[in-house]
Image (cartoon, rainbow, N blue to C red):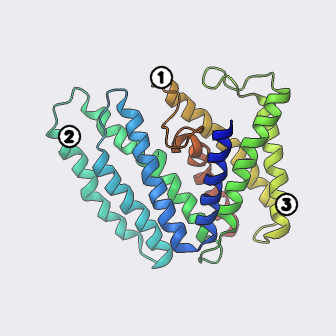
Amino acid sequence: MKTRTITAFFFTIVMLGSIFLGSYTYTVFYLILSLATLYEFFSLIKTAGIRPHRNIALAAASLIFLITAGLHYLQFETKYLLLLVPLIFSVFISELYKKEKIPFANISYTFVGFIYVTAPFCFFYSLGFMVNETYNFHLPLSFLLMLWANDTGAYLFGSKWGNTRLFERHSPKKSWEGFFGGMLTSVFVSYILSCFFKDMVPLLWAGMAILIASFGTLGDLVESMLKRSLNAKDSGNILPGHGGFLDRFDGLLLAAPVVYAYIYLILN
């Protein structure tokens, strides 16, 4: 417990620092974090005998993230996404030179990495540029605080009153009581945030909290399903007491695209 608490404290400081220290720090930090998480995902998949095209995928993921940053900083046109086409075809060409029994599994999981890890990080990153199309830390900071509040509330309510299991087959400890407790905690934090950040009215902040609690929990369950299918306890060991990056950001991966779409529709 002591190791877990120390890791959580320092990791929280780093996460908050990456947001408060300006747009360039924000960009570099989440580029590195997204690549590290993608690398960890491929490493986890390899334990099942699947060999995704890791190096090509990391190069493509870097390009996807940098093009996303370019859309915000330099107002790039979406036509620059065509730069990904050669990298996409290189996955198929590279597989032709391998002698694998399951070539399309290797190809498929390469693209799953983009969808499951890279795209959600790009959506989360873009939250920082949704207000007036300039960098503003309010939305990404609020997202993380509400996500953490949901995790904390779910743990506390679940430990105290959790009797009805949510998806016992994939996560034996999760309960419906913990789920709604986490959502309540997240909504409470959203109200506090609405008192300081006037980007949206309190009701819309509460809607964001409900989406984060719902899809953050779903992301946690999906990652648990992935680990159980591979007989893995944790996705990695880079964070003592917490596992890997996938273990820490499983909620973000499914919640970020939904929250981005929600706020985009509100602001437009």
Q: Secondary structure at mark 1?
A: loop
Question: Residue tagged by mark 1?
Answer: 231
| Local SS, label 3 | helix
Q: Is 123 left or right of 77, judged from the image as shown?
A: right
Q: Give the labeled residue for mark 2.
A: 95
Within the image, what quadrant is residue 113 found in?
top left
Q: Judge whether 113 appears above or below 23 on screen.
A: above
**Which badge, 1 or 3, comes first in the chain's sequence?**
3
* 64, 234: nearer the viewer: 234
Mark 2–mark 3 Cα distance, whole angstroms, equals 52 Å
First in sequence, mark 1 or 2: give its number: 2
Instruction: Tell me the residue at 60%/72% (across/down).
Output: 21
**Is disc 1 in contact with disc 3, using a CB cutoff of under 8 Å?**
no
Residue depicted at 50% across the width and 30% down the height:
226
Side of 107 where 162 appears, left or right = right
Task: Say how many tags the image has.
Answer: 3
- Residue at 41% x, 74% y: name it: 77
Instruction: Judge by depth and name the residue closer to the eye, 228 or 86.
Output: 228
Q: Is residue 132 above or below residue 86?
A: below
In the rendered view, tell whether residue 194 sits above or below residue 115: below
Residue 265 visible at all: no
Tell me the mark number nearer the camera, choosing from 1 and 2. 1
Q: In the image, residue 207 lies at what x, y percent?
A: 77, 54
Tell me the residue that label 3 is attached to.
192
Q: Quadrant of the N terminus?
A: top right
**Mark 3 crowd level (few <14, some 14–19, many ≥20, 10 Å Cα):** few
